[in-house]
Image (spheres, grey):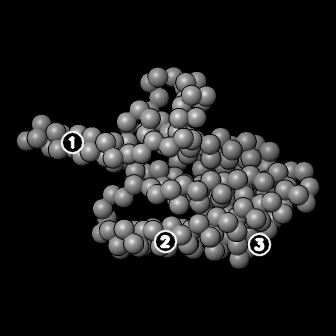
């Protein structure tokens, strides 16, 4: 019986990987960054790193150590691109990764939205970002009844814009340069727009 269940699970994973589309950015990351990783590193391990980094980021930001917090956030945010690229280019897409990768993303963005965006930009902006993330989770669960759905391009763009917007806001906090603040506002506003696009995409599929 265990062998039958394992075969079903493995077949499910194979089917996912056969349908996974590899994007240009995945090939770029594979060529210039993924080759630097030890071969034993898996996409799920990178996702786990992002999950475990969230408490540290929370601690550094809440204690006012913005330099270390920014460094941790940049590495954590970059890991989101790495685990996806590694999974798609090496055909290691798993059910665990599909479930916990977006959880790690939402925890990372949620914590920084509460501690950084609400403090240095606008509490309403932070609320909208968190509210839309919660809506995406609820809609996905309601629409698909717990079925595992792979991330869509609109969601990836949203995450990229959120991370870059937060990074520029952190640069503003560290330097005081208004340019960083203005650029951060633009990126976070675009991220909100793509969050609405993601809501429409998840509702329509």
Asked if 161 appears above or below 27 in the picture, the reply is: below
Q: Residues within 10 Å of mark 2 (few under 14, many from 20)?
A: some
Mark closer to the chain start, 2 or 3: 3
Q: Give percent across and percent down for residue 96.
A: 36, 47
Q: Give percent across and percent down for residue 32.
A: 61, 28
Whether pointer 1 and pointer 2 mark residues with C-beta atoms closer than 8 Å, the reply is no
Q: Residue furthest front?
A: 24
User: Which residue is at a point 53% across and 69% down the rendered structure image?
Assistant: 197
Whether pointer 2 and pointer 3 mark residues with C-beta atoms closer than 8 Å, the reply is no
Asked if 48 appears above or below 177 in the picture, the reply is: above
User: Which residue is at a point 76% across and 65% down the rendered structure image?
Assistant: 186
Q: Which residue is mark 3?
A: 122
Q: Give the CA separation, mark 2 to mark 3.
A: 23 Å
Which quadrant of the figure has residue 157? bottom right
Judged from the image, the secondary structure of the residue bearing numbered disc 1 is helix
Q: Give percent across and percent down for residue 65.
A: 79, 48
Disc sitting over residue 11 in the figure: 1
Mark closer to the chain start, 1 or 2: 1
Q: Give percent across and percent down for residue 143.
A: 35, 73
């Amino acid at each position: 019986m265990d062998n039958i269940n394992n075969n079903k699970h493995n077949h499910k994973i194979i089917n996912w990987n056969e349908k996974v589309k590899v994007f240009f950015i995945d090939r770029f990351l594979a060529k210039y960054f993924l080759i630097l990783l030890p071969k034993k590193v898996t996409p799920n391990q990178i996702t786990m790193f992002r999950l475990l980094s969230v408490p540290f980021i929370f601690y550094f930001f809440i204690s006012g150590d913005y330099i270390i917090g920014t460094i941790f956030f940049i590495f954590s945010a970059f890991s989101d691109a790495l685990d996806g690229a590694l999974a798609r280019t090496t055909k290691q897409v798993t059910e665990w990764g599909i479930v916990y990768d977006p959880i790690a993303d939402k925890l990372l963005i949620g914590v920084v939205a509460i501690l950084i965006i609400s403090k240095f930009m606008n509490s309403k902006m932070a609320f909208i970002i968190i509210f839309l993330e919660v809506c995406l989770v609820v809609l996905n669960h309601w629409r698909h009844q717990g079925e595992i759905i792979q991330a869509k391009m609109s969601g990836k763009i949203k995450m990229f814009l959120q991370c870059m917007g937060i990074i520029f806001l952190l640069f503003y906090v560290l330097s005081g340069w208004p340019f960083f603040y203005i650029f951060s506002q633009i990126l976070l506003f675009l991220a909100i727009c793509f969050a609405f696009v993601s809501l429409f995409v998840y509702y329509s599929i």
